[in-house]
């Protein structure tokens, strides 16, 4: 079987490519390298001992996508390409709506044109907005994401649902990621944010490695056990394995199906900081600062549907997350920079 991964040189895409290669699939990666590195794909090939076809192109280039789908005999597509910086999406909403939505529309048009109709989409728990009840199930109302990034994911979910409703030949999985963190256990691939990281875990590891001085903890007065924000952190390798399972299930059962990919466990910012110190021996200098606009107090997945229907569960806990994130950061203090081979 041959799988095309859009955004396959990025963080989630590269780990998913590795899981697929290791499971014996032929993998095609298409990526415009706007927020990703060619080196990530090279390292996936090394880890898997398998060649990956790399197409450097924008997914909005529908002709290139269509010809890749036919040329390589692609059976299914995993769609990870898109912009994902929440803060930037608030400053540049047009860019986010245009890029994320156009990319998906072009991809689906190309797929439709050549008759490839199995699609796994990277969605996000932000579609739930600030959920009324925790843990949040897939049946919770999707409501009011607090930023254009989240809205773009919600709009794409709607588009894909309509596409599948109009043509039952489509099989579509909408995967609502909670907070993907960590890295492959080899430390060869991992998260490589450009500039100052927006997300907690890369910021923590960059403090530990000396690239940043102090972690700002956004808010110490939330209604949580220690006052700091609570999230459901999922190891990126667990997440990647979830994609493989979801692809199997929709290929077999069809329809348009939604799954949360999370652990069901909530962890506070201070618990992450403590775990980091416990596992790596490195204390993280931090100070509590005012809340970040748009943040919610707590979010945590109900993972039961994915567990039952995908026969999948997140197996790696917080200690493994921290250990692997730290190994990646320590071995690659500047990320992929300097090792690019273009
Ligand atoms: N956070 C923090 N300092 C940072 C980055 C994040 O205190 O430098 C907190 C943030 O307020 C939230 C949690 O860490 O409670 C996870 O934030 P992240 O940006 O990683 O993911 P989000 O859940 O916002 O998508």
Image (cartoon, rainbow, N blue to C red):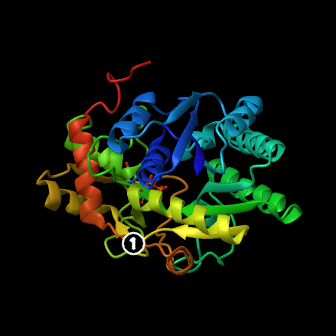
Crowd around label 1: few <14 · some 14–19 · many ≥20 (10 Å): some
Residue 327 lies, with reference to residue 32, above or below; the image says: below
Task: Give the residue number, with chain letter if any, for mark 1.
Answer: 266
Ligand 1: image quarter:
bottom left
In the shown orientation, is residue 334 left or right of residue 34? Answer: left
Give x and y (percent) for residue 51. Answer: 45, 36
Name the residue located 53 percent from the left edge and 65 percent from the top edge.
245
Residue found at the far right of this picture: 166
Name the residue located 42 percent from the left edge and 37 percent from the top edge.
193
Closer-to-camera residue (291/108) = 108
In the shown orientation, is residue 245 left or right of residue 117? Answer: left
Give x and y (percent) for residue 88. Answer: 57, 39
Residue 207 lies, with reference to residue 157, above or below; the image says: above
Element carrying mark 1: loop
Some atom of ligand 1 lies within 8 Å of the CB belonging to the residue at label 1: no
Q: Is residue 80 visible?
A: no
Name the residue located 59 percent from the left edge and 47 percent from the top edge.
2
Give x and y (percent) for residue 38. Answer: 45, 29
Total numbered badges shown on the rendered structure: 1
In the shown orientation, is residue 129 left or right of residue 273? Answer: right
Closer-to-camera residue (241/98) = 241
Give x and y (percent) for residue 289. Answer: 35, 52
Q: Quadrant of residue 162?
A: bottom right
Residue found at the far top of this picture: 342
Residue 154 lies, with reference to residue 53, above or below; the image says: below
State the quadrant of the C terminus: top left
């Amino acid at each position: 079987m041959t799988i095309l991964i859009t955004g396959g040189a990025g963080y989630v895409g590269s780990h998913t490519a590795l899981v697929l290669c290791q499971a014996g699939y032929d993998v095609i990666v298409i990526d415009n390298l706007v927020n990703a590195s060619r080196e990530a794909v090279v390292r996936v090939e090394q880890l898997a001992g398998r060649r990956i076809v790399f197409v450097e192109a924008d997914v909005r280039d529908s002709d290139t996508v269509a010809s890749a789908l036919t040329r390589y005999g692609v059976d299914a597509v995993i769609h990870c390409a898109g912009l994902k910086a929440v803060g930037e999406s608030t400053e540049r909403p047009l860019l986010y709506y245009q890029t994320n939505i156009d990319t998906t529309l072009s991809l689906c048009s190309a797929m439709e044109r050549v008759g490839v109709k199995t699609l796994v989409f990277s969605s996000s728990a932000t579609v739930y907005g600030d959920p009324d009840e925790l843990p949040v199930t897939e049946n919770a109302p999707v409501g009011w994401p607090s930023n254009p990034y989240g809205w773009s994911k919600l709009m794409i979910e709607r588009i894909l649902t309509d596409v599948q409703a109009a043509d039952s030949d489509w099989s579509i999985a909408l995967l609502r990621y909670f907070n993907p963190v960590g890295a492959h256990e080899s430390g060869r691939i991992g998260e490589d944010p450009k500039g100052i990281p927006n997300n907690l875990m890369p910021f923590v590891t960059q403090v530990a490695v000396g690239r940043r001085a102090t972690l700002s903890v956004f808010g110490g007065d939330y209604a949580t056990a220690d006052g700091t924000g609570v999230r459901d952190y999922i190891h990126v390798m667990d997440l990647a394995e979830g994609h493989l399972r979801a692809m199997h299930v929709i290929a077999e059962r069809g329809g348009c199906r939604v799954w949360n990919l999370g652990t069901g466990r909530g962890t506070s910012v201070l618990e992450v900081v403590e775990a980091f110190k416990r596992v790596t021996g490195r204390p993280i200098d931090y100070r509590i600062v005012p809340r970040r606009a748009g943040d919610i107090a707590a979010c945590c997945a109900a993972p039961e549907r994915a567990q039952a229907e995908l026969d999948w569960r997140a197996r790696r806990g917080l200690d493994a997350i921290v250990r692997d994130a730290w190994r990646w950061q320590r071995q690659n203090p500047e990320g992929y920079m300097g090792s690019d081979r273009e």
